[in-house]
Image: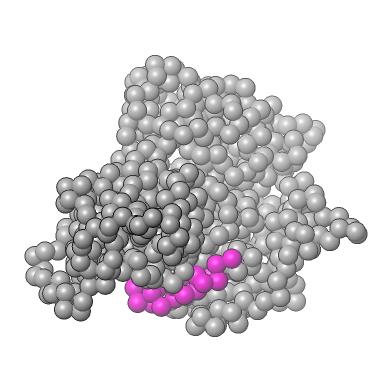
Amino acid sequence: MPAPPAHPCSAADNLQAAIALLAGLQGLGLRRLVLCPGSRSAPLAVAAGVLERRGLKLYTAIDERSAAFLALGLGRADGAPAAVVTTSGSAVANLLPAVVEADHGAVPLLLLTADRPARLKGCGANQTVNQEAFLAPCCRWFGAADPRGLAAMPPAAMAALAQRAWAAALGTPVGPVHLNLPFEEPLHASAAEIEALLAQPAAAEVQPAATPVTPPVAAAPAEAGSLLDPDRPGVVVVGPWRAPAAQLEPFAEALLRWQRRSGWPVLADGLSGLRGWPGLQVVHGYDLLLADGHGFPAALQLLRLGSMPASRRLQQWMAASTGPQLLISEGDPRNLDATGTASLQLSGGLASWLAALPDPVRSGPVAASNQAWLEQWLQADQQLQQQLDRNLLGEERSAAASSPCSEPALARALSRCLPAGEPLMLASSSPVRDWESFAAADAPYRPVFGFRGASGIDGTLSIAAGLALSHGRATLLCGDLALLHDANGWLWREQLAASGARLTVVLVDNAGGGIFEQLPIRTGPPLDFERLFAMPQRLDHSALAAGYGVAARSIEALDQLADVLTWAAQQPMALLHLRTDRRSDAALRHQCRRTMATIHQGSDGGNTLS
């Protein structure tokens, strides 16, 4: 059967259409684009090169998977969507891991994938796959250009496509959007045509619109204002921050106002962005204080903010609290109640809820019982922090070069050694959990990022590179298997250097999947735990990094940490390699959880808070 006729267009038409689409997105606020190689996507590649001269920041990547994770890091850092451009076929499939995380973690992301026109689909033409469906389950919206090709679209239709895609990426909740863009041949404009475009006057530059950062305000039901009583004891639980970065400060200020009115302790997840926030009285060690049934009694009422915190002990404690629980998100209407115990969920944001409360509820002194309740939490946390210093950094666990460093002690030391304000990313599995429990309460404030949405280890290094490019600097705390999952992330070194940014990678090398040592699954023969779970790899990470041109240094003792961090800060990308013993570290964590929860009990062995 003869194929349908091709839509008549020239290579120049394709290029002009690609420029029009990207310029439309740039006018809406697109500032950054990550470009992957390909032939079908050639018009988009040249268009990106043209618009780079008009203010678009362009990054290039040979690996689509790594490219999508870099864009994910850029979007997480400041809440503005970055775009990824790929060719057709399996290139699109490689975007899926990052799109899954963007969906779960509410990160704005634009995926622009080139394709064959519809006349070549389903007839055996080369590099034609069902790429329209690859990302759809995880995207806020899927849009497609004219099936005959992008050049067949009228300008108004193309502008509407860009506007809808941008709005969907920044909708409620924010997240990934996929635009599939067919191109009819010929694809490659001539050198003369490209030079003519580059010669256009500077007046043609696009001035991006401001990126919206304010979440939509949903009307709260009448019962929302009376659900919680600030004159009775309660607790605030804050999960990982998943809204645009610009909204964190007004959120924290609203929380400060609530705490000053209620006196409720704030149990803030390590990824909440609130630890070290000036004026906020935060309980850091709740994961240890609530361990083994020795912890605090169930709260009479809970104000839950955002997504579920990582600590399972905290989740269990929340589930056991039978009083009212109000769950408020910052513009995310999805069900965030994994414990199934929320009395009511609102998505209009904490500040809006607080502003709508009656004056007597919003103002007034802290009740004496609430102040006593807060002091008990803070005193227990202070005692816990002192005990952690003795157990992890004291003489009984010295940082002598002859003794291996422990992962909990590294988290504690690193939290104090990193400069104030240094952006930090925590890889999934052990690093984020160790930071949750063992980072020091007196550490200075800094932005802390992690990806607990899907909790994968895919793309860890590339996400961190995106954060570093956005902030100008960053540190990544990462395990060896997570780093190996994204070895091509080292390729971002050259673009970090060109941008004047830097990324320091602190590698916890425990020869395998250390997280599995914390689960009760290690058995003796005939099952081989190492082969089935830990999967250690005989690899020299420093040598691998050196192959990418990345400098590395080893850390033998924690007292070297400050000096090697200073050295790394002079490199565009650096690896700090620390070897640990995962079995002994697992035993240390278990010991801490067994003993730390009892430090706030009275001399008669009873819980002083009951």
Question: In screen coordinates, is 103 left or right of 180?
Answer: right
Report whether residue 550 is seen.
Answer: yes
User: What residue range appears in magenta?
Assistant: 485-508
Q: Is residue 190 above or below residue 233?
A: below
- Identify the residue shown where x is 51% and y is 66%: 461
As drawn, the residue found furthest toward the front would be 1
Q: Is residue 558 above or below residue 179?
A: below
Q: Quadrant of residue 388?
A: bottom right
- Identify the residue shown where x is 55% and y is 75%: 575
In the rendered structure, does residue 497 fall within the stretch colored magenta?
yes
Give coordinates of residue 400: x percent, y percent. 71, 74
Q: Is residue 500 above or below residue 119?
A: below
Looking at the picture, tell me which residue is in the foreground, 166 or 393. 166
Looking at the picture, tell me which residue is in the foreground, 415 or 120. 120
Looking at the picture, tell me which residue is in the foreground, 609 or 490. 490
Question: In screen coordinates, is 494 left or right of 214?
Answer: right
As drawn, the residue found furthest toward the right would be 525
Instruction: Name the image colouring.
Output: one colour
Q: Quadrant of residue 535?
A: bottom right
- Identify the residue shown where x is 79% and y is 63%: 530
Marks counted in the figure total 0
- Identify the residue shown where x is 43% and y is 21%: 224
Q: Is residue 171 above or below residue 197?
A: above
Give coordinates of residue 291: x percent, y percent. 71, 41
In the rendered structure, does residue 406 fall within the stretch colored magenta?
no
Q: Quadrant of the N terminus?
A: bottom left
Give coordinates of residue 310: x percent, y percent. 59, 44
Give coordinates of residue 534: x percent, y percent. 74, 62
